[in-house]
Image: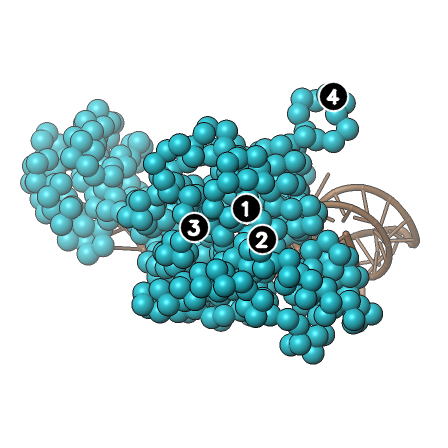
Chain colours: A cyan, B brown
Amino acid sequence: MSRNIAAPRGTRDLLPEETSAWSHVESVARDLARRYAFDRIEIPLFERVELFARGLGESSDAVEKEMFRVSGAQGSGEEAAPWALRPEPTAGIVRAFIEHGMHVRPGPLRLTLIGPMFRYDRPQAGRYRQFSQWDVEVIGDAGPAVDAELIELGHRFYAEVGLTDVVARINSIGDAECRPRYRQALVDHFAAHEDRLSLDSRRRLRINPLRVLDDKDLPPELAADAPRGMDHLCDACREHFDAIRALLDVLGVRYELDHRLVRGLDYYTRTAFEFYVAGREGQQQALGGGGRYDGLVELLGGRPAPGIGFGIGLDRTILAMEEQGVAPAPRGELVAVLGMGDDHDRRLQIAGTLRQAGLAVRPDGSSRKLGKQLESASKAGARWAVIIGDGDAMALKDLATGGQRDAVSIEEIAPIVSG
RNA sequence: GUGGCCUUAGCUCAAUCGGCAGAGCAUCGGAUUGUGGAUCCGACGGUUACGGGUUCGAUUCCCGUAGGCCACCCCA
């Protein structure tokens, strides 16, 4: 028990009974990525700390307190570990985009990946130090159509895994032209009431005033009176945002405006959105989110290029599916091959033939009496049992109904099992 | 990083006032002489999370640590 080594805090094992739901969700994501013409990319699980610091922003929680640092070789004596496990994939993907000169490729580029992310914060149900995301990014497209397309894609993903009551919340936080003005308006507003702000918010007021809006302790009057980003958008940003909303209406995507939605990472410009599931009382109801990052490529040293993307939390998606009772429990049509005595040569030969016909086959490796073999086949989840008798005699038993067909030939089995 | 609750067999949980650590499920075997699921019988399974303290004696009381859950913070 505890005397033995346990999984690290905030991590968990996915046991066989859980992984079928994961496979299903991942295959929905991969198939959607294919239909929406995204190409798979893979990047390292860890990067230079400074990539995240620069890319996500020093004042973001992910950098400020959730960096999962990794050191190099033992005894290297380095004071600070130069690497950190990726807290999100966008910075790494943009790094790869720049490093490989991908701006010369016919764009806009559409990239996707599924994999683990790491944040060193305190675990809770639905929140882990290692968690999985499905991520999509489009680099090189500044128009509002792609914003709407991505929000619609996220929306469709939740629908295809069977979730209901998932709604997108959207906001626009402006760009390089209008965001500074909005920042100033926020500073002016909150500075007048600084004594009523939390310590965190006072600090944020200087470093990143937008994130004061994130503060749940913000007195309601202050929040209500706070200047709204949408009232400070420049004409270009307003047009962009209005266009997205019109497109979402045409596409029939449900969304809500949330003018306090600013997102935790600093690189976002203009569009910010999150997907929420209704009915969860806890705080972990954010299933995914993303936004536009038109300045990030340049910030990381590349030729300026607009970008937009989202990450969907697979752990929380599956949690929500379980809560809504839509998690699949697929069990393929498994065939057990049973025999009598030590006829393992026959069992393995027949198993081989059936496998070549595409079936999932589990031969019994024991020489126990037939009843025991049937019992364990049944417990292992087999739907069918091929029972080898003396000579060439073979029977196919339906373990669900108990029905049995005697004297079948091996060629007859696959068509029956496949239905 | 802060606070609250919790931790006994693989799982779900008992254990009186501080007095020999139990049950159901699961697993394995038998009843069953070569056709499963039911039923019955049996076996296996424990440093009571870990470490310390109080006590003749601690699953029980106290302290610490780890882990889980919940609420913050924030996010996926």
Q: Is residue A91 visible?
A: no
Among all residues in the image, which is located at the extreme bottom? A221
Going by the numbered disc 3, the residue's amino acid type is Ala
Mark 1: few, some, or many residues within 10 Å (few <14, many ≥20)?
Answer: some
Residue A166, position as x, y percentages in the image: 43, 66
Relative side of A239 to A356, left or right: right
Is label 2 in contact with label 1 (beta carbons under 8 Å)? Answer: yes
Closer to the camera in the image, B27 or B73: B73
**At numbered mark 2, what does the secondary structure look like: helix, strand or loop?**
loop
Q: Nearer the N terminus, badge 4 or badge 1?
A: 4
Tell me which residue sits at (63%, 63%) in the image: A182
Residue highlighted by disc 1: A295
Subunit ID for the residue under disc 3: A
Subunit ID for the residue under disc 4: A
Residue highlighted by disc 2: A176
Distance from Cα at disc 2 to Cα at disc 4: 45 Å
